[in-house]
Image: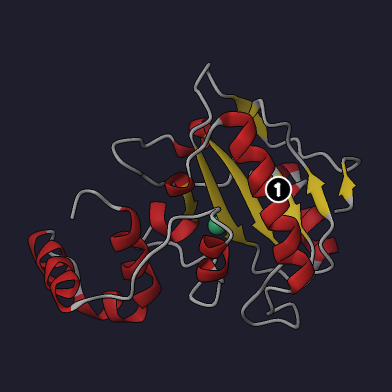
Amino acid sequence: MKYITKYKSPNYNSRQNSKIKLIIIHYTALKNIEDAISYLCNKEKKVSSHYLISQNGTAYNLVDDKFRAWHAGKSFWQGITDINSVSIGIELDFSPYGTNNNFSFKMMFSLKLLLNKIQKKYKISKKNVLAHSDIAPFRKKDPGKYFPWKSLSKSNIVQNFQSLSYSDKEIIEKWFNINNINSKKRENNFCIIINWIRYSSSI
Ligand SMILES: [Zn+2]
C-alpha cells in the first residue's frame, strides 16, 4: 500500500484525552482524489479525516491519529455524542454520481490493511467499525448500499450480519414507530436499516 503523508489538514483539535474506540467509514462524494485532498485540507471547509484512500489504493494520512479530526458531524452511537473525539475517520475517494463510483479492488485492499493496522493498534473490535450512516442515520448515507460489508466481514474485519429475518423487520418497524420516524425516509435508506440491525443494541 502506497502511503503518503505530505498533505496535512489544518482542520482538527484536541481529543481531550478521549480513548480511540470507533472507526468511521465515509465516502467523499467528490469528483476525484485531487478534489478530495484539497477539500479535506481546506481550512474554510472545516472538515477533515485521518485517512483518505484513492481509487488506486494510495492511502493519505491527513490528520495524525492523536488529534480529533472533523468527519462525523452531528452524530451519536451508544450514548456517545462527540464521535469525533473517540474515532478515526477514513474517507474513500468515491462518489455515487461520478466516474469514481466503484469500490475498486485496490481501494478495498488498502482499506483492509489500514483497518487491520488501526484495529490492532487501538484494540478496536470489529463491531466498532461503523458507517457514517450508522452514527448519523437520518442525515448521512455514506459509504452507501454498495459498500462491500460482506467481503470485509469475510476478512473478519467488520461484524458479520445476516439478511433480515421477518422478526428483525418487526423489531425495526416497532423501533421506528416508537420513535415516530417517517416511513418514506426509512424506505429510501434500506442500507441504514441493515446497519442499525447489525450494530444497534437499542432496538
Ligand atoms: Zn461521511
Q: Residue at x 65, y 45 (%)?
A: 116
| Image quadrant where residue 30 sits | bottom right
The quadrant of the image that shows the C terminus is bottom left
Q: Residue at x 63, y 26 (%)?
A: 13
Q: How is the image coloured?
A: secondary structure
Image coords of residue 103 (percent x, y): 68, 73
Q: Residue at x 8, y 60 (%)?
A: 178
Image coords of residue 191 (percent x, y): 40, 73
Image coords of residue 179 (percent x, y): 13, 59
| Kind of residue sitting beneath label 1 | Leu
Q: Residue at x 70, y 65 (%)?
A: 108
Q: Is residue 132 left or right of residue 63?
A: left
Residue 46 position (above or below residue 110): above
Classed neighbour count for the residue bearing mark 1: other residues with Cα under 10 Å, few (<14), some (14–19), many (≥20): some
Image coords of residue 71 (percent x, y): 57, 46
| Image quadrant where residue 105 sits | bottom right
- Report which residue position mark 1 lands on: 114
- Image quadrant, ligand 1: bottom right
Res. 7 visible in picture: yes
| Image quadrant where residue 25 sits | bottom right
Q: Is mark 1 within 8 Å of ligand 1?
A: no
Q: Is residue 196 left or right of residue 140?
A: left
State the SS at label 1.
Answer: helix
